[in-house]
Amino acid sequence: MATEKQWFIIDNVKTLDTPALAIYTNRVKENIQALLSSIDDINRLRPHIKTHKSSEVSALMLRAGIKKFKCATIAEAEMLAMVGAPDVLLAYQPIGPKANRLVALVQRFPSTNFSCLVDNINSAKHLSETFQQHNLFLPVFIDLNIGMNRTGILPSDALSLFQNCNPLKGISIIGLHAYDGHIRDTDFNLRKKHCDEAFAVVLLLQKEIKNRFNKELTIVAGGTPTYSIHCKRKEVECSPGTFIYWDYGYQTILPEQHFAFAALVVTRIISKPTPDIICIDLGHKAIASENPISHRVTFLNALNLKPIGHSEEHMVFNVEDGKEYNVGDVLYGVPYHICPTVALHDRAAIVENNNVVEYWNTLSRNRKITI
């Protein structure tokens, strides 16, 4: 156990029920400043807000001068509009009722410029018809599949989609969206090689559309793993997201990125069923559990724990010396994957000067806010 106070220790932790998500605001602000210093033009930043899902953190980025944002849900888009974000890209193709919800967003927040993705003509026609019915106009990005194989259209087929979308009313293709989240090599040179190869087809498509239609499309590319590469391309808007809180997973595979852990899970030992086993209250409901049990959490003040069991409300560890640990002890953990961990907590404890001073709601973890 830690014997001296470190940055993560909460002095009034007795008032904090666990398991809890704790946000260290000074570190959040440091991460924002680190992001700003990593790029030549703040207008090329379009951070993804799926990690924090917080009105307050979004406001911190706005105050720092960031004006463009990316999100994945209607609720996240609404949250951004509520705090005055001027430019919001819904990096998702609105299917079914989502098209009507997007119309409602555009109507409710006229000061925010909304856009979204499409990757097929039927979805584009649906958006066109929906927005025409309301005498509205929606900017749209073509979603490209450059190897992620999750969403998007192959770049070789995208020119045809652009042509077919051109006559449609109510929408207009303004950009290309290329997410390369599959490129995660720890070796930076290898990651750059793979990123450059995947991005080359995007540049060719942009050039061909400009030559044939005299229209220069904006490119939004990458996420956190390839941010270090795309931030050097002056023609690209970049969308890192995890930088805001950081996590142990990206700390491990992205050694060139120097962001600080700014969000921790705080948990307590609730039982010692045997002398060499402890149980804490950090169950599946409190920390992302999609990775193997060995890759879910790392404790800053207890590095010698070996996880042996995990269920809804409990996490169990083997310990080398059980005498070190007592029921009631507080542990401070860095999640391996912070984004889905945040989504498990309806509020976060805000830590300043080693004390919990207030709580922020994780507003857009909800599927619906008002729209």
Image (spheres, grey):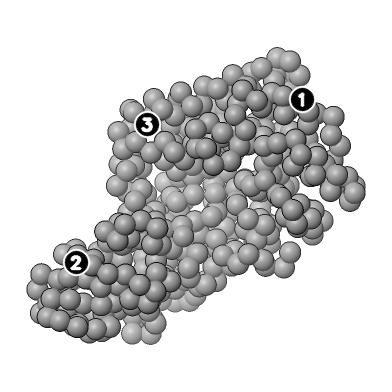
Q: Position of residue 210 (x, y in %)?
A: 70, 19
Q: Nearer the viewer, residue 26 or 148?
A: 148
In what quadrant of the picture does the N terminus appear? bottom left
In what quadrant of the picture does the C terminus appear? bottom right
- Circle 1: residue type: Gln
User: Does 25 appear above or below 129?
Assistant: below
Q: Residue at position x 35%, y 56% from top?
A: 291
Q: What element carries label 1?
A: helix
Q: Residue at position x 56%, y 65% from top?
A: 365
Q: Where is residue 21 in the image (x, y as percent from the top left)?
A: 42, 70
For label 2, the residue is: 305
Callout 3: 10 Å neighbours few (<14), some, many (20+)? some
Determine the CA span between mark 3 and mark 1: 33 Å
User: Does 332 appear above or below 293?
Assistant: below
Q: Residue at position x 79%, y 44% from top?
A: 127
In the image, farthest residue toward the top: 211
- Circle 2: residue type: Leu
Pointer 2 and pointer 3: residues touching (CB < 8 Å)?
A: no
Q: Is mark 2 on a helix, strand or loop?
A: loop
Q: Residue at position x 75%, y 18% from top?
A: 214
Callout 1: 10 Å neighbours few (<14), some, many (20+)? some
